[in-house]
Amino acid sequence: MKLNFRPLAILTVVLLWTLSACQKDKELPDVNKTADKPLVVETTEPTKPTTPTTPTTPTTPTTPTTPSGPGVDCCRTKNVIIVIVDGARYSETWGDYSRENVANQYKLYPEAVLLGNFKNNGVTNTEPGHAAITTGVYEELDNFGQQTPTYPSLFQQFLKSTGLPAEKAWLIASKDKLEVLGNATKDEWAGKYLPRTDCGPSGIYSGHRSDRMTVGKAKFVMDQYHPNLMLINLKDPDSYGHSNLWDSYIQALKNSDAHIKDIYDHIQDDPIYKDQTTLIVTNDHGRHLDHIANGFIDHGDGCEGCRHIQFFAIGPDFKKGLGFQTPYEQIDIAPTIARMLGFKMDYSKGRVMNDLFK
Ligand SMILES: [Zn+2]
Ligand SMILES: [Zn+2]
């Protein structure tokens, strides 16, 4: 008797496809198990001044008893999204005057500020580079996720100062090892005010996942929680660089640029984010200059290629269509964000990048 395999085969394919679709859904952040408390976010819009009847003397500010909301002090920015394109060398981003690998960002340039002399002046590896951005301090950290930064992250400082729930600060990374960036070892910060994290396929020591997946999750989290502070790590340029695949490295830069445009559009399509969100695009480190060590394949020393990175930002408080050569650096990002969102980085060695502000 002849067995009829065809319907069986079709059934199997359909079954496998269904299973894989379920699997994909499972890979989205495990959010539905968390009860979503209605958030009471203070509206901190300055009230319109009424005509004063008598001249008032300024009172000295007292310590606020209620949590202060984002953007209280100076700025219209209520949310900051940082995108870190891992291991992109400046000579292939803004240092390439064809702009072909940053074509989408180049189109946004009339709305943006750009720094032409922005550096990682610490250890030019992934973990220390990211930590310099999130803590405002250069620290020699293990590059395999075995070591938590000493000083509190932007996320912790933000959550502490505002009293907002964890889901208002997110760390979303293609590289699992970046999960350590949420925390600090300093006594009074260890394990406290932690952001939500979604790093690698399923957290630390689970490996890497695709940037496409990471961006999907970031957009999902934006829709679901509207975090005020979010860091997104895209790994592909670094991964293809290490694999010595030049064309794939270049393609990864172009893909990252497309992801950035996608994230920017997602911000501007959302009434909660539109025109009150600052997007910062930067790198953790560059790659060796062509004549140093093994060139673009690697990074980690103090050569110009490893240090020189991009800084491109769009936000309601920043100037538009302007570039600066001021020698700002990675540790300046945290205090600049802190200024916009109205909190302090207690230990940061960086400075506020005043040139960027209108
Ligand atoms: Zn690398
Ligand atoms: Zn180098």
Image (cartoon, rainbow, N blue to C red):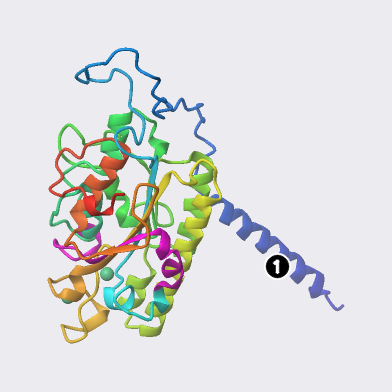
Percent x, y of residue 73 = 29, 34
In magenta stretch: residue 114: yes
Please tell me in which quadrant of the rendered image residue 22 appears: bottom right
Above or below, 272 against 56 in this view is below
Q: Is residue 346 magenta?
A: no
Image: 88 above or below 227: below
Name the quadrant containing residue 342.
top left
Residue 353 lies left or right of residue 198; in this view the side is: left
Picture layout, residue 188 above or below residue 297: above
Q: Which residue is depicted at the point 39% across and 31% down?
A: 165
Residue 298 percent across, percent down from the top left = 23, 76
Task: Quickly name the residue at label 1.
Answer: 13
Disc 1 secondary structure class = helix
Residue at 37% of width from left, 30% of height from top?
164
Quadrant into which the N terminus falls? bottom right
Q: Is residue 311 visible?
A: no
Residue 230 percent location from the top left of the image = 38, 47
Residue flagged by tag 1: what amino acid is it? Val
Q: Which residues are magenta?
A: 102-128
Which residue appears at 54% of the width and 46% of the height?
270
